[in-house]
Image: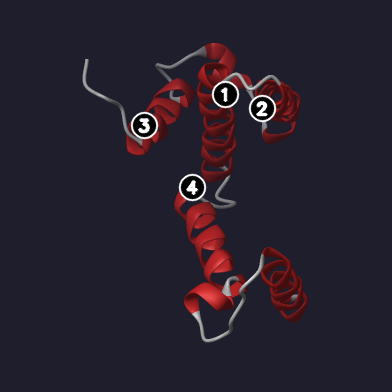
């Protein structure tokens, strides 16, 4: 089996939520997914604390899929799509890292953090 991509995961979520998909997945709402994403994030935390990189890889995948499923449900309700989530976070990262993508200078982690906070404050 070939290596799966992000696009494949989005297509899997779409199929699971389709009329020919999984009854349990079709029944889920954005609100009902809160429990599952909380559980998966907790499992990521545990894997990090335990230094268990093999399990961390798996748990990160589970969190990623929860995000994709929530975005799929949002798309069905015409709230937003996965591409909107990606676009928003990419633009935010670029606009807040002005020392990387702009003309500001940050030589230390502390300077970077202070600039991040200042840039975030400007956006709000």
Residue tagged by mark 3? Answer: 11
Q: Nearer the viewer, mark 2 or mark 3?
A: 2
- The residue depicted at 54 percent of the width and 13 percent of the height is 23
Measured along the vertical axis of the image, is residue 22 above or below residue 13? above
Q: Secondary structure at mark 2?
A: helix
Q: CA distance from mark 3 to mark 4?
A: 11 Å
Mark 1 or mark 3: name the one nearer the start of the chain. 3
The quadrant holding residue 10 is top left
Q: Nearer the viewer, mark 1 or mark 3?
A: 1
- The residue depicted at 68 percent of the width and 35 percent of the height is 30
In depth, the one of 19 and 87 nearer the eye is 87
**Which dot marks residue 56?**
1
User: Which corner quadrant holds the N terminus?
Assistant: top left
Q: Secondary structure at mark 1?
A: helix
Colour pattern: secondary structure
Q: Are the residues tagged 1 and 3 within 8 Å (C-beta)?
A: no
User: How busy is the neighbourhood of tag 2: few (under 14 within 10 Å), some, or many (20 plus)?
Assistant: few
Please state the horizontal and vertical placement of residue 37, each as a whole percent of the image. 68, 28
- The residue depicted at 64 percent of the width and 24 percent of the height is 28
Q: CA distance from mark 2 to mark 3?
A: 29 Å
Q: Secondary structure at mark 4?
A: helix
In depth, the one of 29 and 52 nearer the eye is 52
Mark 1 or mark 4: name the one nearer the start of the chain. 1
Residue tagged by mark 2? Answer: 48
Measured along the vertical axis of the image, is residue 106 above or below residue 72? below
Q: Residue furthest left?
A: 2
The quadrant holding residue 112 is bottom right
The quadrant holding residue 120 is bottom right
């Amino acid at each position: 089996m070939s290596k799966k991509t992000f696009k494949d995961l989005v297509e899997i979520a779409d199929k699971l939520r389709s009329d020919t998909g999984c009854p349990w997945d079709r029944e889920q709402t954005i609100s009902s997914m809160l429990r599952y994403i909380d559980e998966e994030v907790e499992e990521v935390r545990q894997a990090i604390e335990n230094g268990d990189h093999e399990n961390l890889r798996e748990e990160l995948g589970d969190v990623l899929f929860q995000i994709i499923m929530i975005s799929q449900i949002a798309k069905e309700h015409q709230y937003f799509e996965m591409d909107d989530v990606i676009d928003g976070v990419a633009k935010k990262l670029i606009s807040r890292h002005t020392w990387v993508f702009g003309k500001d200078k940050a030589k230390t982690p502390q300077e970077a953090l202070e600039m991040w906070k200042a840039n975030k404050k400007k956006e709000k």
